[in-house]
Amino acid sequence: MRFKILSLCLYNFIEQDRSLSMSSFENSEYTSTFCSAGTQPENIRHPFVHESIANVLSCNNNNSSFDDFIDEQTWEVNYDPSMEVIDSQALISLAHASDKVIFTDISRFRPSSRGLIKLATTRNVAAATLLALNILESAIRMSTGNANGRAPLLKTMLHEMERADHSLAPILKSLLLPFPGHGLNLRNLLWHGFISDLPRPWFSLVLLLVYNLEKQQDAKLSIYQEENEFFDPKSFNTLNDLIEELSLSTSDIENMSNWLPETSHRDLFQLAITWRNENQYPACAAVLLSVLIEHGLRIRWCRINDRPCDLIAKPGAYFVTLDGHGQRNQHDLLLHPYMGQDDNERKKNLLFEYLGGGR
């Protein structure tokens, strides 16, 4: 059901704006501004992140070793908790060390993690990492005693771990939070659609951290749990009618695929469609489509509001996103009627009007 709703959203958005693609930026003035914002034309693998972030994401090993921080027998990761964060090169080395470890005995992992290992090795590393990050955040929530109820912000939970001198706190902060010069902010880069391709060591590091936290807390986490309906769509008559009428043909799916930028994100879309056609993992497919919808909306938001610099993720900066959980006053929202955090300088969000908001 969730997959159908998200497919409907994506399909109708594309039908309303078939011109939405990277060709939208082909006029010289706009392309010049886009490139000067930090994305280099030759950075094909990560065109929507700043060059400094792309360099870290490339995961080029500097030959330094972090093997000593991973126990070969127990797989325990240890790092001096008195360190606030670790630098990007150390994080890269730890990722490569993790990649050498986790494939030696995948039977140690729980079924959900083994499924992600298969996904990472046979289909799509970025999709596997995106889903693994969800499990990692759940493990962090368990570790900080926030198993039930509304989850605090990720940075709040990591600061709790830091105050408790948790050995993984410096690594988790460097991997997940946006500290300039240190923090990779990997979760937000993936979940908000800025990257669609990753070297495998990043997936390995995320999964090894999951393993360590699950082992410490004996948490039982799985991305393949039986789905629970959060609402009954029949209580929304118009939405229910649209869902019942939704039937995507092969040509519809091809149009949706052609809408995506030529050099990125297409593999994620194809994986979501494959899961749809195979009737597998609807919740996971819905996650991928959610990321693609946000990515597409951001492209249009930047173009229609003449904000090309917000196309890319920049170090230490907040992103323009669909949600504003706990931080609405820090950044713009794609579907909010207005842009800007200062009431005296607010402007209308033209994308909101373009999509029929307020009617």
Image (tube, rainbow, N blue to C red):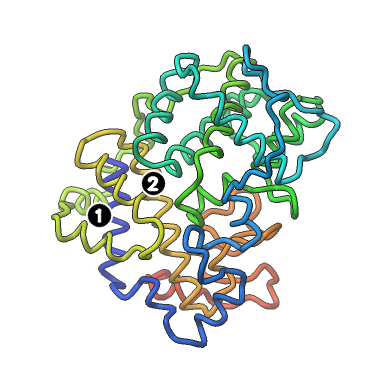
36 or 172: nearer the viewer: 36
* Neighbour tally class for label 2: few under 14, some 14-19, many 20 plus, Cα within 10 Å: many
Left or right: residue 295 versus residue 8 is right
The first of marks 1 and 2 along the sequence is: 1
Give the CA separation, mark 1 to mark 2: 25 Å
* Neighbour tally class for label 1: few under 14, some 14-19, many 20 plus, Cα within 10 Å: few
Q: Residue at x 56, y 51 (%)?
A: 189
98 versus 193 height, above or below: above
262 versus 230 height, above or below: below
Q: Residue at x 75, y 29 (%)?
A: 161
Task: Identify residue for label 1.
Answer: 238
Q: Quadrant of residue 68?
A: top right
The amino acid type, in three-letter code, at marker 1 is Thr
The amino acid type, in three-letter code, at marker 2 is Leu
Q: Position of residue 42 (x, y in %)?
A: 51, 68
68 or 50: nearer the viewer: 68
346 or 214: nearer the viewer: 214
Comparing labels 1 and 2, the label whose residue is closer to the camera: 2
293 versus 131 height, above or below: below
> Farthest residue in the right direction?
82
Q: Position of residue 103 (x, y in %)?
A: 48, 24
Q: Residue at x 59, y 64 (%)?
A: 332
Q: Secondary structure at mark 1?
A: helix
Q: Secondary structure at mark 2?
A: helix
Is residue 89 visible to the viewer in this orientation of the structure? yes
Left or right: residue 124 versus residue 140 is left
Task: Identify residue for label 2.
Answer: 288
